[in-house]
Image (cartoon, helix red, strand yellow):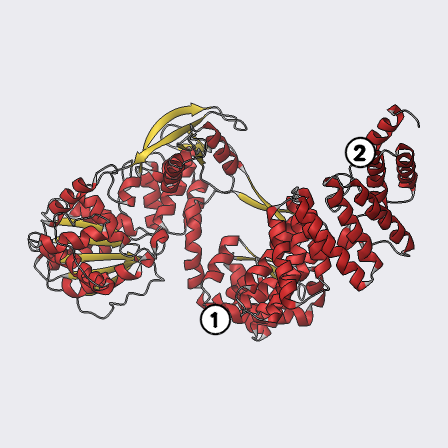
Amino acid sequence: MRAGLDVTDAIGKLATPVNSALAARVGIATGLAMVGELFGEGAAREETVFGDVPSLAARLQALAEPGTVVIGQATRRLVGGVFELDDLGPKRLKGFAEPLVVWRIAGMSSAEGRFEARQTAGLTPLVGRDEEISLLLRRWRQASDGEGQVVVLSGEPGIGKSRLMRELRERLGHEPHIHVLYQCSPHHTTSPLHPLIEQLERAAGFERDDPPEARLDKLETLLARGTEKLDEAVPLIGALLGIASDERYPAFELTPQRQKQLTLEALLDQIEGVAAGQPVLLICEDVHWIDPTTLELLGLAIERIQRLAVLCVITCRPEFTPPWSGQPHVSSLALMRLGRRDGVTMMEQVVGDKALPAEVSAQIVAKTDGVPLFVEELTKTVLESGLLKDAGDHYELSGPLPPLAIPSTLHDSLLARLDRLAPVKEVAQIGAAIGREFSYALLAAVADRSEDLLRAALDQLVSSELVFRRGTQPETIYSFKHALVQDAAYGTLLKSRRQHLHARIAKALQRDSPEVAEAQPELLAHHCGEAGLIDQAVAYWYAAGKAALIRSAVTEAVAQLRKGLELLHSLPVSPERHRHELDLRVALGGALLNAKGWAAPEAGAAYERALELCQLLGDRKQLFPVLWGLTVVYVNRAELPAAREVAAEMLRLAEEQDDPVIQVAAHRASSAARYHLGELVATRGHLERVLAVYDSLHDRLPPTLYAADFRVQALCFLSITLLGLGYPDQAGLAGGTRSSMRRSLPIPSPSDSHCPMHVSSLALPATWRLLRLMPKR
């Protein structure tokens, strides 16, 4: 959402050559969308996104005014108070039966944290966390007495970490203290001290349009609460925030390392100075996304906190390993899922004083699996879904009960479920490396474990409903319940383990399924690439691209050949690498001609690089198709002198090799360049040479290279050329010959994308009409 605002703002500031302002419109809808593989096989499948959500996003975008962001109701519910919103009221949108209420984003909210911002309505009372809140309150008492404490609060997404922090703050609301909140972000894991910068800007009260002087004034006021040494703290922290302070404070001449060290010390001094006046509740949220410099600062702070009136609560997901464990003032607190009774209690508090139907309650409790956020969200979803009708003191179903939709954030808990299946997790990881679907035979070849152990592990995965099974042994096929399950399992693999698994998969496919390499080379390319077997991967991507071209799947061919080129760059420069690149570039040039058009800059770039490689390697075999491709591009881009020069080089090469096939193509290319330059005499000579050499060939030109019948093209162009030279009778003969060949030769269609430099079938009838109008000599 913030990115949408930034994009619209940035585009509005772009300068244009015509001094006309640009503007972007953004529409955002939230929910599940389907990604479908419509046709083709393997990596050649065309995918699209469909469903109500992408359709709604498109309608909202069309509704938005230039420079604005418009959101739907589901998105509105999720963002809560993070943004200031303008209610646009109900709108009728194409494709939706009922009017939908929409909102326009007016700007960022002043709410301090993500959790507070989303709580636009009353909070559901805390359920099942009495022991946890008691521990936190005991640690607060110790910290208030000057014995600083640290609590590392861990739990899976949605388990209630932020809710517990809100409860703690409410319990301490009547006590004098300072609250400091640092929030880590998944988008800033490499942004040094991002949580500190965000908190300082928020605490100082910076406004978006504040001039530098005003920001410096606000920063001085903020820092004065924690230190009297403003001449040291302001320049350092001002530089961190991008505020120039040279006019008020002497400039530092420090090395980057020394400046970083002094900045961290200044930030720590601020915490210590504030804690000297009042106890401090310091909350650092989502530390699993912490950047390295903030992690370093947090480690230094934890050492210093021990003698300060500070309670530091660090929230994180279970995968984060705190490096401070074992210190006497550091406690660990893991949040567990709610029991069934607590889940029912929470659901009842969300509903209020009206009971839900028993079958609905049972589904909510079963599907949310004790995660508080999902109990709340799914209950609200059911209440808003129209499934229920108000029957006074209770709700009743208005129709059959469909399977309840799980909130999208629930998918984050899949990793935790896999972790709880530790004994069979490795089997899930191997299956995930193979793909969304995998056969028992391939899994057994890769897993390297006994049949009994493997089948027991698969049975457990199937029982957990993370994996489905179909068919009978030995033809059993397994598939992950959802792509996110596969992603979760695969994401837990270390890079070295991933490479090892992909190498074993590729080897097993090559050994046991050679037909796969022939039918789906892209599958082998993927596994070899992930295994670090770059040479093999490049070869398979080339084979996949060539196979796609043969099937006229030019878009897929372009993608596959480009993947080969991307991998190739990781290899050291060598003649072998140049040869691989030359093959890929030649194939890519042909694919781009067909996918992007005969004048496409990308195609020209591919052929120009291929020409460089031919010259570097002294490769004469590949030179001719490269020159042919360049001629096509130059003619269609009207770079006619360049086209004539390249065609002349083709003629020299053809004569040198004494090959009639490439002689025909070279004369055809030369005739195209000369014709468009208006050199009709030379054009006639080349076209007549095409016909003479062509008639001497026993076989027609290979269509995979040129995809054209040069005799037909030559006759067509010759007819027009002779007419231009003033020989209408001969032009008529050439045209008539071409016409009589329609029954015996497959003439390329004007829309045939495999026929560069062809002549439209409209040209010859136009020539005949001119011939009939011209006086006979």
- Number of residue marks: 2
* Place of residue 546 in the rendered image (x, y in percent of width and height, measured from the top left): 70, 57
Q: Position of residue 295 (x, y in %)?
A: 27, 61
Query: Which residue is tagged 2?
Result: 763
- Secondary structure of the residue carrying tag 2 is helix
Q: Amino acid at mark 2?
A: Ala
Question: Pointer 2: residues within 10 angstroms few (<14), some, or many (20+)?
Answer: few
Q: Is residue 513 above or below residue 749?
A: below
Residue 419 percent across, percent down from the top left: 42, 63
Q: Do the CB atoms of the residues marked 2 and 1 lie less than 8 Å apart?
A: no
Residue 8 higher or lower than 276, as above or below: above
**Does any portion of residue 139 appear in the rendered image?**
no
Direction from residue 737 to residue 78 in the image, left or right: left
Question: Going 49% across and 33% down the picture, which residue do you hit?
Answer: 56
* Residue 550 lies in quadrant: bottom right
User: Pointer 1: residues within 10 angstroms few (<14), some, or many (20+)?
Assistant: few
Q: Is residue 370 left or right of residue 171?
A: right
Q: Which quarter of the rendering shows the N terminus?
A: top left
Q: Describe residue 699's horizontal placement relative to residue 646 as left or right.
A: right
- Identity of the residue drawn at 22% across and 64% down: 255
Can you see residue 72? yes
**In the image, which disc is placed on residue 244?**
none
Mark 1 — residue?
A: 496
Distance between the Cα atoms at labels 2 and 1? 62 Å
Which residue shows up at 83% across the image and 62% down it?
658
